[in-house]
Image: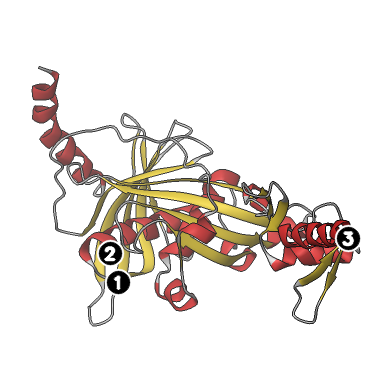
Amino acid sequence: MLRVILMRLTPLVNDWRNAMFDLKGCDNTLGLQERICNKWSPCPGKVLLYAKMGLHRYNLLQGTKFQLIRVKKYILSIGSPVGSYYITLYAIAAGSSLQTFQTRVSEEEGGKFILTCKIARIQGETSHSKRVMYMGTSLPEWPPENPFEKCYLVKESELQDNDWIRLYLELAVATTTGRDCGLSNKLEIVKVAIDDALNAKNAIIYIRYNDLYKAELGKDSDRIAIVRRSFDEDTGCFMLVGQTQSSEIIPKNPSLVVANEDTGCLSLKGQNQFIKGFAENKRIKLNPTGLANQISSSLATCEDHQVANQHSSDVETA
């Protein structure tokens, strides 16, 4: 029964949402306000980011590369700590004339990076979802293995061709800190990893970045943004969920002390830099290649033990 009711209500909801873009002035009964963006009333930084998110959804699904020119106006829901934004904007792509777009971006929880976009279209098109469905909003967490070692590392050229990566970073910072101005000059991307193809509709993106604003305040500036991108084919709902954390969550990847099952002795297994760290403490002597010649600590290699045992046998025989 509930399913039938939802199916009947969905067209009415779609018509109501489509009409929101044409609202003039204020409608206090619905808690909505129209705000025009011009030189006397510049568009807020957060709204510009939301407009770019809507364009990104359109580009991702349609395989286009429209770029934001400016926001014309937006309708904002008021009276709640979270808002829905019905944004009318101008955008253009190479080989295309200027287009007027409409997009709706909603904040799902105050102070968190949980955003949904159910409408992103060229003005005049209609958007109709088949049904209403709730999408999970749990924040993505750091995986058990370092994604910068296990996932695909985005190349510098790919980073330049996919400006949505920077958009994700700026959205993560703006939604969780309230900073929505000057982000492009204060956030330096160090490296990016993704657990799927760059254009996958469902993926998790890991962005390591340097927050120069925090650095100026003497705070931890080496940060990680984790963003999960989701798209539901039935509802047409596009969602971005994420958080920012200190880069200290990245495992240090130390070398391991491994016991040999046959000899029972210990060996060092890992990176040369780990061995060099011992050398700096005068526990290992290095040859010109940077590898260990001799280990003076109790953590000797299996070969050292075997050589020592052989010498001991030779002495006893003699």
Q: CA distance from mark 3 to mark 2?
A: 78 Å
Q: How many marks?
A: 3
Q: For mark 1, what is the residue? A: 65
Q: Nearer the viewer, residue 226 or 249?
A: 249
Q: For mark 2, what is the residue? A: 59
Residue 176 location, quadrant? top right
Question: Is any atom of residue 43 visible in this view?
Answer: no
Q: Position of residue 228 (x, y in %)?
A: 41, 48
Q: Position of residue 129 (x, y in %)?
A: 16, 42
* In this rendering, the label closer to the viewer, 3 or 2: 3
Residue at 53%, 45% in the rendered image: 142
Residue at 22%, 57% in the rendered image: 121
Residue 59 location, quadrant? bottom left
**In the displayed structure, does residue 185 sit left or right of residue 290?**
left
Residue at 48%, 33% in the rendered image: 81
Q: For mark 3, what is the residue? A: 315
Nearer-N-terminus badge (3/1): 1
Q: Amino acid at mark 2?
A: Asn
Q: CA distance from mark 3 to mark 1?
A: 78 Å
Give residue 114's mark: none
Nearer-N-terminus badge (3/2): 2
**In the displayed structure, does residue 87 sit left or right of residue 235?**
right
Q: Nearer the viewer, residue 240 or 77?
A: 240
SS at circle 1:
loop
Q: Position of residue 243 (x, y in %)?
A: 53, 45
